[in-house]
Amino acid sequence: MNALEPFIRIVVLTFDGGDLTLECIRSLDNLDWPRDRMEIVLVDNGSLDDAAQRVREEFPSVIVLEPLANLGFAGGCNLGMTHDVNGALADRYDHVALVNNDATVDRLWLKELVHVMQSRDDIGGVSSKMLFADRYAPVRFAIEESVGNRRRDELGICVSAVRIDGERCDEVLQFDEGFHGAVDADLARDEEMARWSRRTATIRCAVADDNRHRIGVRLNAKQVVHLRLSTDVEQVDVVVGQGGETVYTNVEISVGGAREDVINNVGSELYQLGFAGDRGFMCTDAGQFDEAVEVFAWCGGAALLRATHLDAVGLFDPRLFLYYEDTDLSWRARRAGWRHMYAPRALVRHRHAQSSGVGSPVFRYHTERNRLLVAARNAPLSVVANALAREIRHCVRVNLALLVKRPLTLKMPSRPEPRHRRRVLGHILRMMPAALLSGIQDTTTVRRANVRKRWETVKW
């Protein structure tokens, strides 16, 4: 191709995306990029809504593919990337961009990705700066003091209810990674929520205006905890847990007009035991990620991929179906000598996990299963053996605790989690031989251990 600008194919996948899909396509149609140097391909992954027909009517130039089945993220993207291609992808286009249908892109998004891609010939993928779609009013938690010596992983306080101006609005709340879920299913059963904090944590409220609002929280703790709540306009100190864990403390605090952007992804990271995740996840966007840097992997939610890199490394593994498929492809590319970069000015706003839902059974099954399968294909065998042993041990412990020990203490057995753990482990064991074989067959120029040594980091 001799044109000044590379030719880009943009692939969008939708599954009952409705209005979100239309908003995504509209943002792509507004890109600052020559129309004769780009094409948009929408893959409708077996939806029951009318989004595909609405796109056809509003954007006749968009290529709409309807396989009449849910091919998953991996299969759907592969279909979009290979449509109307005979031979090498690079003979059809220079790069392919992937965009989640629940994301909207900045007008200069594609230009910024291409600018970073063209800085080196060995860059295979470039990741965007992906922000959550909403802007938030934060309420920050900081444990100032507690009775006794506290370990780093010890429980802090539990948030069991939140009100905004006296109204329950759980759908507009975001709990950052300073919080985690319930630690006792029996205790959490009668609560609106059960979010336990570490030493510091933040609740963010996606209120639609810049007015002052009153935030109320209901708290409890397993020991006496001195807590400080702070916002842009107020600070409140409170002692929680003085009467034991069943005694609640109700606190109110005001938030003013300050709102903040929150990071969803600025490139992806490799963690221990084969885990991978979003770099910068849940961090306030305060300019700390404004430099173009090399990252372990790109996020498939909004990325630019070089066609020659895909021809050399291959496409997504359709056996993964959903989640970790971008990690797998990034791993394989790294083992083949390709680099991945992050473009800080390629802005995207994303409504996180609109299709599957974070924490849903679909999300949990595919992330937990695929982590081990991707590790089996790409990571050193010591990592695979350690991760598999831990998964087996965890499955046994959950089944013993909830199916055997609970009846012995006169409690009803709890079956959903043991069933889930057996399903995940069973599918891992059945699919792992093929994953190991795929790893052996992959063309490799960089040792797995070297990739791990360079990129593995500790999450907490």
Image (spheres, helix red, strand yellow):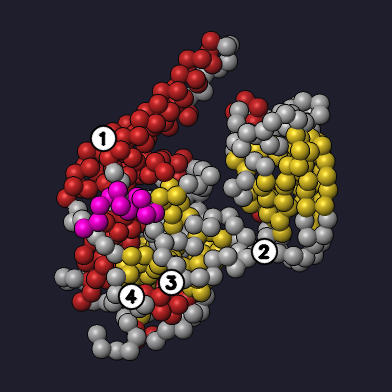
Query: Which residue in the structure is indicated by mark 2?
Result: 260
Instruction: Look at the numbered disc 1 and give the secondary structure of its residue.
Output: helix
Task: Read off the residue under disc 4.
Answer: 120
Is residue 381 visible in the rendered structure shown here? yes
Which marked residue is nearer to the observer: mark 1 or mark 2? Answer: 2
Q: For mark 4, give the secondary structure.
A: loop
Q: Quick check: marks 4 and 3 in contact, CB under 8 Å?
A: no
Q: Residue 55, which numbered label?
A: 3
Within-10-Å neighbours for mark 2: few <14, some 14–19, many 20+: some
Magenta region includes residue 429: no
Which residue is at a point 60% across and 28% down the rendered structure image?
184
- From what the image shows, is residue 55 above or below residue 241? below
Our reading of the magenta stretch's main secondary structure is: helix
Nearer to me, 276 or 130 = 276
Q: Quadrant of residue 198?
A: top right
Disc 3 versus disc 2: distance between alpha carbons? 32 Å
**Spatial distance from mark 1 to mark 2, Cα to Cα?**
45 Å
Q: Nearer the viewer, mark 1 or mark 3?
A: 1
Pointer 3 local density, CA inside 10 Å: few below 14, some 14–19, many at least 20: some
Mark with earlier residue (4, 1): 4
